[in-house]
Amino acid sequence: MEQRTKIGYLVGGGLKENFRVRLVVSPQEMQEGAFVVIQSGEWNYYGIVTDIQLGATDERFASEQTEERFPAHIAKALHGQTLYANLEVLPNLMLEVGPELGTPEHKQWQGKIDAGLKDAPRILPVKNIPPHHAQVYLANEGDIAEIFGSPDDAGNLVIGYTREQGHPVCIDMEKFVQRSSGVFGATGTGKSFLTRLVLAGLMHYDKASVLVLDMHNEYGYDDKASDTGKPVTGLKTKFKKLRVVGLGAGATIRGQVPDFNLEISTGDISTADIETLSRELNLQETTPTTLSALYVSFRDKWFAEFRAMNRDQVIFEDERGKKKEVPADGSVAAWAIANGVHVASAEALHSKLRRLFTKPYIVEKPAADSVKNIIDALENGQHVVLSYGEHESDLDYLLVSNLLTRKIRAAWEKKTNEFRTHGKSEPRPLVIVVEEAHKLLNREMAAQTTFATIARELRKYYVTLLIVDQRPSQIYDEVMSQLGTRISGWLGDDLDIQAVLSGLSGRDALRGMLARLQPKEEVLLLGWGVPMPLPVRSRRYDDVFWKELLGGKEKKSEAELKKEMGY
């Protein structure tokens, strides 16, 4: 096994503050976010570097340039004795490693474990502290594998490499799908590429079915990178179990014909779906009352009947020959008067809904029940990318996404209840990928949409979210608090950084680390799916990635790793 590199020894700190480590190497050899191991007796402590500080035994030595006043050998000796550098280390985990390997004590210790007389060592949160002068090392590849898992273990996706030595860092896909998760980063930091990496891992290791609400048509078919113009492999090219669905009859995606098309039946649109569009359509406060009356009048046919109504008036002549205008049969006003609804409110709603009445993907009788086809595909272990094609306005995205997830939620709740009550087959885990998540999960919308319910409680029904967003601060804080794994690229806004770190211990130490990530090159791994926070060099979404994921576990050469890391 690779030997650890010693970097210093422990000189202070505590459980409620960071450990302080005196460096025995140049501070230029260290980076913020470095993964370090503190060895002390039978225990290893694991943490990350959050700060690097210069110090002096006397401030005069720090302020005077002794190398100019003394010969070089004396100046060097003085530097070694009077000037130093300390690391601030955020401790995260501890692991019992037993007595020194190869000693009788270690054999006895291992014997007790094998005989069941002692619990096997397991990784624990830090509950005590090592003594002064415990030795501190840079973590080696074995340490990374001990904490984050080995790339050779099934279900572990290599998401990136440690910044100092290029050791692979994994995310356990099985654990990843157990809670909702998020991919964050400012515009241009490569969120879509990060999301593709994660989706490829989910599909390859078959840990869940995946539904991607692909607002910008990025994930299904091959594409070109907007900044470099280089080809980008679509997920459909690599996974035969992936079905691309186009929104509306005859829709094509990047010149390709999808596997099938999604048409929405007017009977599938509920009044609640319209209420979620209140902000987008600028609906009035009286809208819920009008919608309720429409449903009472027409039940599931309310949308089609309302769309068919006219705004016509007819001239009526009374017995005295006086003419006046009255609502025509089949008009909005005639229906409103007959049902005790405010005429102006009904007509205003009809005017606002004209933006939906003309949508070509909303039809009275679809050629096929494509919503059911999507659900069936997901239940049978396939993956679905719903591409919105030309219909990529916020209105299209909000309506279709919420309607589809409402139907999926009902299907998975039913299957879960049948599994728990009647012993039927266990539901397949499902991950719903939501782009531009703040449009669906902001404070105003969250209470009305199905997505907030999924984030809060649908984990028990085998459904979780993967939200992708550049403005996490605009996502409802209750939803953010429910996220397990968080993969974040660089964020420049303090509120966005605060949102990504919400609910995590040590967030004050991590805040600066997140703000100082290299755009497009580095990400910070946080939360449930990873044992401890760690900044890594994100791997590239390229032919090497696909070869390693699908074509075996070929080890990268040192030269390849250095090239990938930019050295």
Image (cartoon, helix red, strand yellow):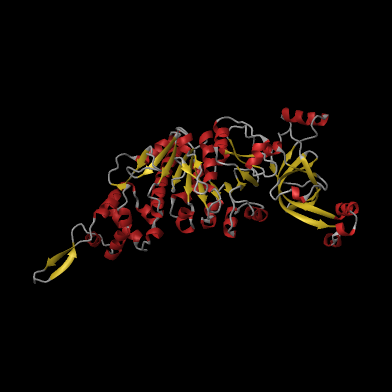
Residue 162 image offset from top left, x and y in percent: 67, 43
Q: Is residue 263 left or right of residue 469?
A: left
Q: Give the residue drawn at x 38%, y 50%.
A: 391
Q: Is residue 149 left or right of residue 185?
A: right
Count the numbered circles shown: 0
Q: Give the residue drawn at x 29%, y 59%.
A: 350
The residue lying toward the viewer, choosing from 292 and 189, is 189
Residue 549 image offset from top left, x and y in percent: 56, 34
Residue 307 image offset from top left, x and y in percent: 27, 54
Q: Quadrant of the C terminus?
A: top right
Does the rendering let one see residue 310? Answer: yes
Q: Quadrant of the N terminus?
A: top right
Residue 80 image offset from top left, x and y in percent: 86, 51
Answer above or below: position of 4 versus 72: above
Q: Is residue 195 left or right of residue 53?
A: left
Q: Give the residue drawn at x 17%, y 67%.
A: 325
Answer above or below: position of 291 versus 135: below
Answer above or below: position of 234 versus 468: above
| Picture quadrant of residue 265 | top left
